Amino acid sequence: MNLHSPLAQISGSDLRDAVIQAVPSLDIPWQKLAGGRVNLLWRANDLVIKQYQPCSASPLFPNDPQAEANALTYLQPFGAAPKLVAQGQAWLVYQYCQGAAWHRGPDQAAKALAQLHKIPAPQQMFRNAPNGSAQLLAQAKMMAALCASPLPPPPQDPGLAPGPTCLIHGDAVPGNFIQHQGRITLIDWQCPAIGDPAEDIATFLSPAMQWLYRGAPLTAQEIKDFRRALPAQTLARYDQLAAIYHWRMAAHCLWKSERNAPDYQHALQLELAALQGLAQQNTR
């Protein structure tokens, strides 16, 4: 897997010139936005300027500006993502979403994902995510092999065959769910894929991702509320794959922690603790 993105970093002045040429109304001061852990974001009036950072992809989360532009364009009629306004070399401009990053109401987040997964999937537009336990385990082992430090042994393959696919967000962390007046809009579409809907469920439930983006893992009650709002088939597949998802996320956190992201060390411990708890639960 080539993790070195072909994106070319352009300077701040060149970025501003290019954006203003495409969207003249943005010849005003830009306000830096917090929250993005990978790319740079600014707001100007009701628009967001997003600059992609070279070499910022990981083995688990791609960082593809064209994929995001495709997703925003495709999803616009469904109201599931911000409106794309313009795009250029390693940057996008899209409509600003009113609201705040998800913090509470897990049933709302589950319903937002369920609605997304019902949207017809454009099979040729996006990458294919690993599907089925063998593919997921192979991906997880590949990620672990990139790390200098060892992980606990991987879980056994439950032999779950690839299942039905749909359009998935691919980076369903809490910070990418924007809540406003009872509605959720998903942002940061640089990782979309055609894949198993359980993939998005696993990312949202990940204690590592919840801690990194919200400051705390989901409580037992929040997990119950989230699960109750999911389609039964998606939940059943997630449960069969949960151990692999946790181990794969642990590999991601280890990979990040070894590449100058020290906060991922605690995230790794949270993921390993969840994996151990799942193993204890399965032996009862």
Image (cartoon, rainbow, N blue to C red):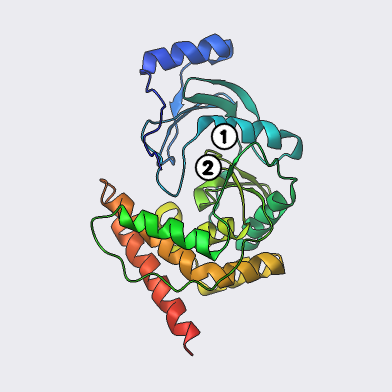
Q: Is residue 122 left or right of residue 213?
A: right
Place of residue 215 in the rendered image (x, y in percent of width and height, measured from the top left) = 41, 57
Q: Is residue 203 left or right of residue 144?
A: right
Q: Is residue 82 visible?
A: no
Q: Residues within 10 Å of mark 2 (few under 14, many from 20)?
A: many
Tell me: residue 86, above or below residue 70.
above
Task: Say which residue label 1 marks.
Answer: 67
Q: Quadrant of residue 254?
A: bottom left
Dot 2: element = loop
Place of residue 281 in the rendered image (x, y in percent of width and height, measured from the top left) = 48, 83
Total marks placed: 2
Q: Nearer the viewer, residue 233 or 158?
A: 158
Q: Are marks 2 and 1 in contact (CB under 8 Å)?
A: yes
Place of residue 196 in the rendered image (x, y in percent of width and height, measured from the top left) = 62, 56
* Distance between mark 2 and mark 1 Cα atoms: 7 Å
Task: Say which residue label 2 marks.
Answer: 191
Q: Nearer the viewer, residue 109 or 59?
A: 59
Q: Is residue 108 visible?
A: yes
Q: Residue at x 55, y 71 (%)?
A: 159
Q: Residue furthest bottom?
A: 284
Q: Nearer the viewer, residue 167 or 204?
A: 167
Place of residue 252 in the rendered image (x, y in percent of width and height, measured from the top left) = 38, 55
Q: Residue at x 50, y 34 (%)?
A: 64
